[in-house]
Image (tube, coloured by chain):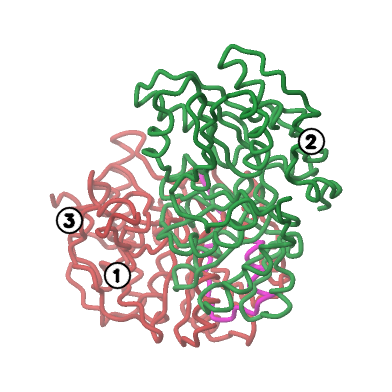
Chain colours: A green, B red
Amino acid sequence: MVEIVNRPYAKAFETFATARPDILCLSADLTSSCEVDGFRDRHPDQFLSLGMAEQNMLSFAGGLAMQGFRPFLHTFSVFLYRRPYDQLINSIAYSNRKVRLMGFLPGITTPGGITHQAIEDISVMRAIPNMTILECGDATEVETVLDVADSIDGPVYVRVLRGEVPRLFSTPFAFNKLRTLSEGDDVLVVTAGVCTEEALRAAEPLKARGVGIHHLHVSTLKPFDREGLIKAARGKKGVVTLENHTINGGLGSLVAEILAEEGLGVKLRRLGLQDTFAHGASKPYLMKKYGLDASALVSAIGQLLGKNLDIDDAELEAVRIDTVHSAQKAEAL
Amino acid sequence: MNLSNQQTTEDVAAGIRKRVFLHTMRNNGGYLSQACSAAESLAFLYNEALTLGEPTLPKVPLPFGGVPSATNPDAFTGAGYHGPFAPEFDRLIISPAHYALVIYSALIQVGRMDEHALDHFNVDGGSVEMIGAEHSPGMEVTTGSLAQGLSMAAGIAWARKRKGEPGKVWVYMSDGEFQEGQTWECLAAMAYHGIDNVRVIVDVNRQQCDGAMSSVLDLGDLAARVASFGVTCRSIDGHDLGAMRAAADSTEPGKPLIILANTSPYQGMEFLKKRFPRLHYVRFKSADERREMQTTIAAELGVDEAEIVRA
């Protein structure tokens, strides 16, 4: 069974920030929800509480960065770009400021509903010049993303996972490099964030039916490891993307752009929110309902190959790799 | 018109109005009213209040260096006209970027920019843009979308205070920016964090693009509202330099200073009263109007009309 790490960000951030006096921890009234409450209590000199006022927080952070501090902003993903989008552009992105936007509860990982679910954040961020976009898929990436984010000369948006996070990877977050999780000849599966764990559940049943899956995990969405994708997509019978995001403008879109530009002529199925808002409910429920789970992936692969793979939910459930993880209740706010 | 920077502040203010007027007449329009309201405030800042080093950019403005990015080493900011960044020097953040023409005129008037620098104004490929951005002379941040300058200044000021730098962070703002919620977010944050190395002068001309503020979204008792946030607020006649000096000297420990400079949008150019309330950007409706304005305002400012035709 896969290891479940409790609050990996809390410890990683404290270790990272205390060794670097130019790092500041900014928070907008969601301090414990972003696992930096302990940091606040133990390192008040490196912590700035800016309250429920994100527009000011983003511009203020731009000013801090102008003076050589490297502010890490902590709040839910959705609050980092929807309300303060103008500030993100004019106070941070245009000037290429070293501001790090640490976005918690990305996509439908929150039961908070439409107001709390950042389902188009990657799409929005991809459209912003100078922006770098990172997404954590497991505890190891949560623990090692801070150094990567801090090494970027410009603004960085990070989708962070909190709470009980499975450890899927044994090697650290590598900037702009796709992770190869399996190699096979039939279908290329490209996943990111929590969807990677989900896709892994389909690996054994597919293998058992002789379907060769080449599985890539994406942790850097902008820039993008174009060559890695092209190499893996070439000669495949189809490509499936699976993302915790709307299919418009995120991982599915960027894979489509590259496949088209390269003229690979390979069929693509984009799984994710099909141009719809979601609503407030548990993560497993929403992933099932909106087709972001292993079952949806298996169906898409079957369609691409033109065969019924005969893998039912019970079989996928049986190989579930996150038994402990899935036992937790819908995350509280 | 060659003036050294050993001028009285009154002279600098008069020079700013004159330069903006000449430019507006020569170019068939401009942000003329902003010169009327802002002249004393900017003259006070550049001639008295600010502690600045010598400019680090050439007197003749550079072409646009490209947008900032990790791969563009040629990008620069217009802060170089305020001198080098050093712990002892002040910073001036210009928040209403559409005051650009007035700012450029002030920089020329105090000798920080070339006498003919306005020849580069609004010229394609140049840095002296109509709505200034961070590469434009005197600008350090990009504030054409209003009400972000104060927050950025607050971040700069917090950082400077943390590092023990004695230099202050001055902000020039327009009253319209108090319609944006971000300004109030920032006042709350500055008060809460005791950011007392910030000095703000607000041009309270009660004008905005649509006309008089009272007809758009009135601010009510702005002084009381600002003061209620726990910052030091002084409301003065923005054309009274004595009052401005006294206000600038009236800081309180632990609090930022906000000076509300109550101004007239046609101070020094009474002719503009005829155009009230459409003063945001002055265009000429007819050749007759242009002639009348030219003659009347030239007389008010003591400008020889022959100067206007200089190519």
Q: Which of marks 3 and 1 is nearer the N terminus?
A: 1
State yes or no: discs 1 and 2 in contact (Cβ < 8 Å): no
Which residue appears at 29% of the width and 61% of the height? B76
**Residue situated in front as seen by the camera: A243 or B110:** A243
Above or below, comparing residue B164 to residue B125 in the picture: below
Most extreme residue toward the left, as rendered?
B311
Give the residues drawn in magenta, as a range: B184-209
Task: Return the chain for callout 2.
Answer: A
Neighbours of disc 3 within 10 Å: few (<14), some (14-19), many (20+): few
Residue A57, picture quadrant: bottom right
Residue to which mark 3 is pinned: B307
Mark 3: secondary structure: helix
Amino acid type shown at disc 3: Glu
> Can you say which quadrant of the picture contains the N terminus of chain B?
bottom left
Of badges 3 and 2, the one in the foreground is: 2
Residue to which mark 2 is pinned: A318
Above or below, comparing residue B201 to residue A243 in the picture: below
